[in-house]
Amino acid sequence: MNKIYKLGEGAEADSSIGRLLLDAGKIKEKDIEPIMNYARKKGLRFGEAAVKLRLVSKEDVEQIIAVQFEYPYLRKREGGFGKELIAAYKPFSEKVENLRILRSQLMLRWVSTGRKSIAITSASHKEGRSFIVANLAIVFSQLGERTLIIDADLLNARQHDIFKVNNNIGLSSLLVGRSSIDEVVRRVDAFKDLSVLPAGAPPPNPQELLSRDEFPQLLASLGREFDVILLDTSAGNTRGGSTTVAKAAGCVIFVARKNKTNVEDASDYVERIRNSRVEVIGSVLNNY
């Protein structure tokens, strides 16, 4: 049986799961005694026994455990978000566990020092920048950190599609003074403490726009409202200003994709980032 049912210890944890299953309408009063008898007989937890007896599904128990430990996530198709949000829909998978490990390292080595902004970048298209940003933001927010995604890929924005937020106005209009922060930052209510600042209308001059003094000033201002700010950048081989975004953030996580990323391109791009005096604090090999 999946180890997720081992999160609680002892009768108190089991009875809590039983009460939550009952309150959620997943089991009935008459089911409790057979489940407990079966659990004692087989040496199982309450949730394990309920699944074995086919009174609830494994997904039901996972949802209840998430509620018990204040670890919110979404059921399949709930919220209408894309299936790539594995941190929301498959929070107990190995891939999401790896994201939590990355989150822990960032909390220890970066966020705990008072620094908040992290740019996620890659050498070329379709290597997983937006995927990593979106899911890493969810696991940060699940920890209770006030988390903001900024879609700074002004030419090929994706975060508004992933989280289903309005992209009529966003970062581009904010940087030219046509919108306010309150107008463009969207709270994603389905997730705890998560907001998105979409890219907005694609400008003809993304590099020049992101090079304005307003951009680092914006990050400083948002840093007073949020604990973690993750920036989705353009690919390094485009004119989208990824290095400029990285410099404003102060650090970069570099994403490579298995069987996709060209090693020479990746090496050249990382060297270019470092020559811009930006700290590369880690790398992620994406296999999704």
Image: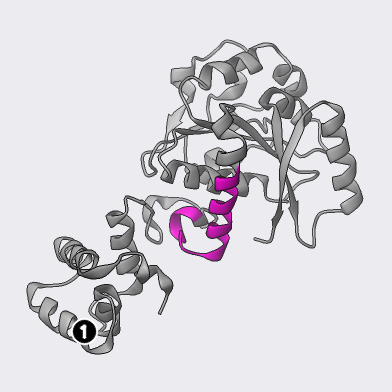
Query: Left or right of 212: which side holds 42?
Result: left
The boundaries of the magenta stretch are 87-105
**Foreground residue among 93 and 41:** 41
Q: Is residue 138 above or below residue 216?
A: below
- Identify the residue at image location x=43%, y=44%: 143
| Viewer can see residue 204 | no
Q: Is residue 20 above or below residue 125?
A: below
Q: Is residue 91 above or below residue 81?
A: below
Query: Left or right of 71: which side holds 39?
Result: left
Dividing the image into 4 quarters, which one contains the N terminus?
A: bottom left
| Viewer can see residue 36 | yes
Picture quarter containing residue 247?
A: top right
**Foreground residue among 177 and 137:** 137
- Identify the residue at image location x=79%, y=45%: 124
**Residue 186 percent coordinates (x, y):** 44, 30
> How is the model colour-coded?
one colour
**Residue 31 percent coordinates (x, y):** 13, 78
**Residue 45 percent coordinates (x, y):** 28, 76
Q: Given the current orientation, which residue lies at the most extreme bottom position?
A: 41
- Which residue matches tag 1? 40
Q: Is residue 48 magenta?
A: no
